[in-house]
Image: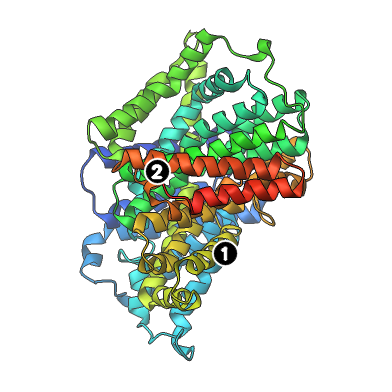
Amino acid sequence: MISTDTQTSPLLRSLMLCLAVVLVVFHLGLIFSGLVPNLVSRPLHLALALPWIFLFVEGGLLKRASGAVLCFLGVAACLWVAGNQNVLSDQYGFLEGFFQYWLAAVLLIVVLEGARRAIGWPLPIVAALALAYGLLGQHIPGEFGHSGTPLASFLGTLTIAEGGIWGSLTGVSVNVVAIFVIFGAVLNAGEAGQGFMNLAAAAAGRLKGGAAKVSVLSSALFGSISGSASANVASTGAITLPAMTRLGYPKRLAGAVEAVASSGGQIMPPLMGAGAFVMVELTRVPYTQIMMAALLPAILYFFAVWIGINAYARHHDLKAVAKEDQPPVRQVLITSAFFMVPFAILLYGMFGGQYTPQYAACLAILAGFVLLFFTAKGVASRKEILSRLESAFVNAARQVSVIASIIICASLIIGVLAITGLGVKITSLILSGSGGYLWPALLLTAIACLVLGMEVPTTAAYVICVSVAGPALIEQGLEPLQAHLFVFWFALISTITPPVCGAVFIAAGMIGENWLKVAFSAMALGIGLYVIPLAMIANPSVIALSDTPAFALLAAAKIGLGLGLISFGVIGFTKPLQKLLAIGTGLLVMFFVGI
């Protein structure tokens, strides 16, 4: 686990801040400096991330000592690759000499162990199994073996060429994901978070179930820049969970509201948990089009949660936020500027100025840095400014490093799939298992996404699943963006679905409730997470907002009506016949009634 200890020694704290500044400046500089060779920028990206994975960690002496050794070796290997990129580009992915074999081994070990230390065992185990398949798969009889690849070519493609850990996905992490993560860290270091809370409280606090609806709105806003369900629960939940508890909301409901609302941050543009930017690379669809395609389904998801809260209000006295606890209008307007100004610059840059998303985000980051010098009461004190700057840099470095460890490890898996042809074989297996029909293929893909999503982060689960199942779905007639959004949504449902449901665990722990009770309530409240991906397949117009806005809005209205009936049927009615009638009507409207 990356250390968040604020009681670190002054020397270590200074070192962390210096490295964080270097990391942030490096990534911003890449956007403004023009083209940098991939075998320079991508190894340097990993080299800057490694200290945050191996050095600045919690743990005993052995863990820190081993981390220091791995960090030194990993950074040295990355710098060697970056410094010798001209020579390596002429080797075409073939290792030459004993030293390069050791270099490849060091890089692979560092990537696997870095991912393990950052996010746990499952993803590196999958990557290690993929490596074993690449090395030994020629000994497997039958269809799922492969013809074998020379060791120099196999390891070289993964470590000194752009076909493995330095592949295109790592490029997304370097050039796009890191920039938007820095953007979120800068906003969170100032008063943007309070602005989200104030705006949500002003918009929904007076309504029935107001505290829960404030959680929904604030989590949607905060999640749009954090892109992490866990971070969302920990941040907005620290405010909304005590508020709901004080108003007498059942603990299982309060925890479920926060978990479900926070999970929506990963499907809410612009950040979408780094998934949107990976989707750009895999589909070659412009980011602005992906953002527009994801917008209506995300709004529908939060609409279903809203309806679910109203349904719960039939059985519980879900009070509004007390008038004295609601922020005054002046405070709402002032604090909202701390996120509205950077957001406006970001959106204008992308849609008005026609800049690339990362360039527009850089401009928004600069505006966010300026706003760190101000509070809702005026100019911040020198101590407060320094604290905010430190928080922005250090949190950005931590988050960029964790995401880098995930994406680079996932890139290793994708590289092996490409080299061995295993991805094509799994695609053929899905096609044959579904009998050539779309909906059985969707079901098989959804199950695979759910199982894999329980073990690895959403972005990694999405990347792995879409690499093997995406081609099968596209071959069955889906548009590439449709298939990718379907897989991405189902990779997310494990955040609220037992047995492994990270957002639920955190929310249940914060509120002191049995996690299983929270999980069942969350599944009912987050029913849209299970239904909307299927509705996107049955109603493809809903993701065509940028091309046919009228048809997209009509499709969204139809899906919204069906969702409302399903959500209210699951939660609001107690009699089985009423439940079945409402759910059946909702499904009929969503999947069988034409626009």
Displayed quadrant of residue 97: bottom left
**In the shown orientation, is residue 502 left or right of residue 535?**
right
Q: How far apart are the two marked residues, 1 and 2, measured between alpha carbons?
A: 30 Å
Q: Residue at x 42, y 44 (%)?
A: 555
Q: Amino acid at mark 2?
A: Ala
Q: Amino acid at mark 1?
A: Ile
Q: Residue at x 22, y 40 (%)?
A: 33
Dot 1: few (<14), some (14–19), or many (≥20) neighbours within 10 Å? few
**Marks 2 and 1: in contact by CB < 8 Å?**
no
Label 1, on which residue? 447
Can I make out residue 23 in this image?
no
Q: Position of residue 587 (x, y in %)?
A: 56, 51
| Near-viewer residue (330 or 101) | 330
Q: Residue at x 23, y 49 (%)?
A: 36
Q: Position of residue 82 (x, y in %)?
A: 30, 56
| Near-viewer residue (169 or 446) | 446
Can I make out residue 56 in this image?
yes
Label 2, on which residue? 178
User: Closer to the camera: disc 1 or disc 2?
Assistant: 1
| Near-viewer residue (524 or 541) | 541
Disc number for residue 562? none
**In the shown orientation, is residue 184 left or right of residue 216?**
left
Element marked by disc 2? helix
